[in-house]
Amino acid sequence: MTAEQVETFRRCMSVGGVALFPTDTVYGLATEPESEEGVRRLYGLKGRVPDKPAAVMFFDLDLALAALPELGPRTAEAVGRLLPAAITLVLPNPARRYPLACGPVADRLGLRVPRLDGALAPLAAARWPVLQSSANRAGGPDVRRLADVEPSVAAGVDLALDAGELPGTASTVVDLGEYEDRGDYSVLRAGAVPEDVVAAAL
């Protein structure tokens, strides 16, 4: 992946396009978080029900924390210990930011900050968030190579970025919604990061 490709990715997002792109886990679909048309198209490509939440991905941890200033200090510290990594965090969202990603529960937000090593390193230059979801059809297997993307999905995107074969295990999903007050958390989905690593960080 090159800096020029990342700039093309930025332009695609700026006009509400839908891109197929690599993460530190599997290939995903991305669009501008405030684009109703982009989100509608992304969900349509996946065959996903409209009220199922997605996540907002930042490519820089400091930018993610700056975009969510309402996070309590204990939760923000936990975010800093867990990310960047192959983890999706479910966080309190009292300001109801990025509502198109939240589904019916507007005061909770999914956050991803991937680890950008190797072929993914140029993505660290991206200074803007995307609404993202995995590139498989709803209920289908996760995608680790562009060649594995279902033809109907691949044909429907405006841009495809290839970073070769990815690890292929989806992110671990951790709920920090009650972490600020009680220090409680729960693992909602086992994934690429083992639960004992999450526990050690928290």
Image (cartoon, rainbow, N blue to C red):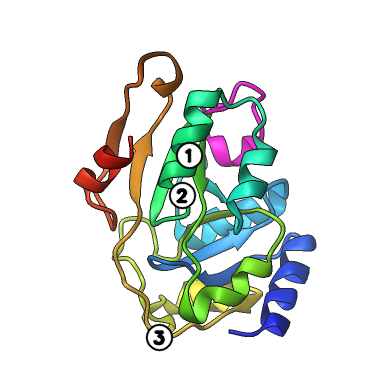
Between label 2 and label 3, give the one nearer the viewer: 2
Mark drawn on residue 147: 3
Residue at horizontal 68 percent and vertical 75 percent from the top: 6
Residue sitting nearer the eye, 158 or 191: 191
Apparent side of residue 146 relative to residue 57 in the rendered image (left or right): left
How many C-alpha atoms fall within 10 Å of the one at disc 2: few (<14), some, or many (≥20)?
some
Total tally of numbered discs in the picture: 3
Between label 1 and label 3, give the one nearer the viewer: 1
Mark drawn on residue 79: 1
Apparent side of residue 46 relative to residue 131 in the rendered image (left or right): left
- Work out how far the residue at label 2 is from the one at label 3, CA to CA, in angstroms: 29 Å
Magenta-drawn stretch contains 24: no
Query: Which portion, as a residue range, is magenta?
Result: 92-107
Q: Secondary structure at mark 2?
A: loop
How many C-alpha atoms fall within 10 Å of the one at disc 3: few (<14), some, or many (≥20)?
few
Residue at horizontal 57 percent and vertical 58 percent from the top: 42
Labelled pair 1, 2 in contact (Cβ < 8 Å): yes
* Residue 66 spot, x, y in % from top left: 69, 40
Q: Secondary structure at mark 3?
A: helix
Label 2 belongs to which residue? 83
* Residue 111 spot, x, y in % from top left: 51, 44
Q: Please report whichever mark, 1 or 3, sits nearer to the chain's N-terminal start.
A: 1
* Residue 90 spot, x, y in % from top left: 44, 35
How many C-alpha atoms fall within 10 Å of the one at disc 1: few (<14), some, or many (≥20)?
many
Amino acid beneath label 3: Ala
| Residue 53 visible from this viewpoint | no
| Residue 115 visible from this viewpoint | yes
Labelled pair 2, 3 in contact (Cβ < 8 Å): no
